[in-house]
Every structure is written in structure tokens, then in C-alpha cells.
Amino acid sequence: MTDDLIARLAADLKPVRRTAMVRRLWLAALPALLVSAVLMLVWLGPRPDMAEAVGTPIFWIKSGYTLGLGLFGLWAVERLSRPAESGKAPLITAALLLAAVAIAAVLDYVLMPASARELMLMGSSAQRCPFYIMALSVPFLAANVMLMRRLAPTNLTWAGTAAGLMAGALGAWVYSFHCTEPGLPFLASWYSLGIAAITALGAAFGRFLLRW
Amino acid sequence: MNRMGDLSELEDRLRTLMLASLAGDAASYRQLLAALTEHLRRYFQRRLTSGLSHQVEDLVQETLLAIHARRMTYDPGRAFTAWAYAIAHYKLIDLLRKVRQDAHVPIDDLADFLAAEADEAALAGVRRDLDTVLDTLPERVSGLVRRVKIEEQSIAEAAAATGLSEANVKVTVHRGLKALVARFGGKS
């Protein structure tokens, strides 16, 4: 019986390219990005001052921070979708980036005039920002879960963490094209909070969602 | 040292077959799956006892299917045996979870999966369990059970060694086993 199975599987054998899995990850991430971006454009709209914003450093810091975390998250998803992988390298790198921005934000907050602090930390959208980020990350999270179930994660909690990090950070990246907040402390608190929430969600439900 | 050498030789052989398989070589793939089947069967046989041994072949097949369908997750830069073992272990845990034996999730490792013969650690574990069970009996009884049932002495030998009558030995061993079954044999 098992011999029959082996014969059948061997007859079904097709070559697999070295890059096959990475290609699949991108093929899942790009449609999710499209859905998330359209959702942002239709629901929230791009920031009205986009032309001036691209000339300011904070726009690029927000974009770079979130995109960086998202790519480290994608790297972690790539590692943790394979059996017996820990994803340590990408997750530690992501944690270092998070910590670096947090430290820079604290310094910035301490050094700025007290009158500017309210605007730079709370801005006008602190209560909404994490929730928008979470909403915009849903397409990424769904794409990750659908894909990873067909791969072979064996550490489901960490795999879920990676899926959540990638989704939350890329959701935040899409959101950064809507958000007009100018503060680094705002980025380090409210953006990070939204990303952390989705990451925690992935960690908590990974072992149910990613089972195969 | 010798065993480590064997393991790395096995790794090299299987990894070479896997790389050829990923390139589309069906003959290598058949060889690889046949070799894996042997390892998987032995691995699951040792893990699935007490009413689950009939599941071994199903689990072997399910693992082969998973290895086939998810073979793109093998990173050629990593050890192949570790990859295959992780899938087998995952499938084993998955089955145990399904049959609600979560209390008995085995702790094992890669070398265990690769070991060609029944390894010492497993046997030592069984012996330990046996001792624990036998120690619940009075010393006189457990001593006789050990002689007759484990060391395979004859009734006459055991009687001669302990100075008891053969009838006494027989009855004592019988009662000892009965007591063990009552205590550890479960409801069936």
C-alpha cells in the first residue's frame, strides 16, 4: 500500500525551483497590498498635503520604519513557514529596529520644547491610528494565513507572530500614506501599538489558524 | 563517534537524493521515499503504543504525502534529515492531539528518529517503567516475578534459588501479575 503511494508520488513529481517558496510569498503579499491600498484610498483617502510631505524627513521615517518592520516580518514568515526553523534572525532584527525608533522617540520627546509635546505625541488622531492600522492589516493577515497553511510551519505560535508582524507593519505602511501626524513620538507609540496588537493576535491564534 | 559518523553519512545520502528529487529526478525520489518510509515506520512504531499501533501505516503515508506536497519548504542550505524529522514529529503530535492523548506527547529528538536500531535510551526508559511498576509489589513477590517473567528462569530454577516450593512460586507469580493487572491494566 505504501509502495503504491510512493509510486504515485514519484509519478506526480515536478521540479521545484529553489525560489519557489519565496515567489509564493510575494504572490500572496502583493494582492494583499493592493486590497489594503484600495481600502485606504477609498475609505480614508491619501493625505491631502502629499506633495509637501514627501519633502519632510518624518514622512520617510514613518514609511521606512513600517516598511522595514514589514519586510523583516515577511522574512520571518519565510523562515517560520519551514519546518524546524526558529526565525530568530529576522525577529531579533525587527525588535532592534523597534527599539531604535523607540529610543530616538524618547530622546526627541525629552529634547523638544514642552509646548510641542502634546502635538508630537498625541497629535489629533492617536485614538484612531492603531485601529486604522489594524483594519488595513487584515488583508495581509488573511493572505499570510491562507498561504502558510499550505506550507509547513511547525512552531505555530512563532509562525503566527511572524504573520502578525508582517501584516501589522505593512498595514501601518499603507496607513502612513493617509496619516498627517508629524511626530516621531507619535510613530513610536501609536503606530507601534497597532502593529503590536496584530502581532499579538497572530501569536495568540497561530496555533489554531495555521494548523495543517 | 561512530554513530555520529553514520548519521552524517545518512544526511549526505538523503540530502543528495532530495536535491535530485527537487530537480525532478523520479528515480532518486522513489529511493528517497523508500528510505524515509523505513525511518518513519520505525519512528512511529516506537512512539505509537497502547491501542494506536494500528495507526502507524496511516501515519507513515500521511507524512509521505505532507513531505511531497510541502517539499518546496525544504531549504537546500539546511539539513534534510532535520526537515523530514520535523514534519514527522508534527504529524505525530497532530495525531496524538486528535486522539486526545495530549498527556503523552513524547519528547524525542532527531537522533531518535534516525536511529537504525532500537536505541538504548528507549530500552532504559522501558526498564525504568518496569521497575517502578514492580516496586509496588511486596519484595518477595516482585523478586519472583522478575526471575520468572523477566529473567525467564523456569519455575524449578526460581524455586531452587529461593528455597520455596514450585507450587508456591507459581501461585505467588500468578497473584503478583494479577495484582499488577488490577492496578495498571486499565478498565478493559
Image: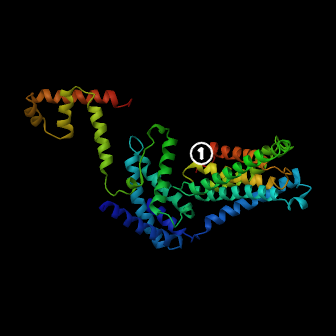
The mark total stands at 1
Depth check: B149 or B71 in front?
B71
Residue B17 visible here: yes
Secondary structure beneath dot 1 equals helix
Give the quadrant of the N terminus of chain A: bottom left
Which residue is at a point 64% across and 51% down the rendered structure image?
A95
Q: Residue furthest right?
A: A48
Q: How crowded is mark 1: few (under 14 residues within 10 Å), some or many (20 or more)?
A: some
Which residue is at a point 87% across and 55% down the rendered structure image?
A41
In the rendered view, would you say A60 is above or below B23?
above
Q: Name the spot of residue B146 as percent of width and height, x first.
A: 20, 36
Compared across the picture, whether A193 is left or right of A19 comes to right
Which residue is at a point 66% across and 63% down the rendered structure image?
A24
Q: Name the spot of residue A140 as percent of width and height, x first.
A: 72, 54
In the rendered view, would you say B58 is above or below B24?
above
Q: Quadrant of residue B138?
A: top left
In the rendered view, would you say A5 is above or below A207?
below
Q: In which quarter of the image is residue A190?
A: top right
Q: Mark 1 points at which residue?
A: A207
Depth check: B142 or A161 in front?
A161
Residue A133 visible here: no
Q: What residue type is labelled 1?
A: Arg
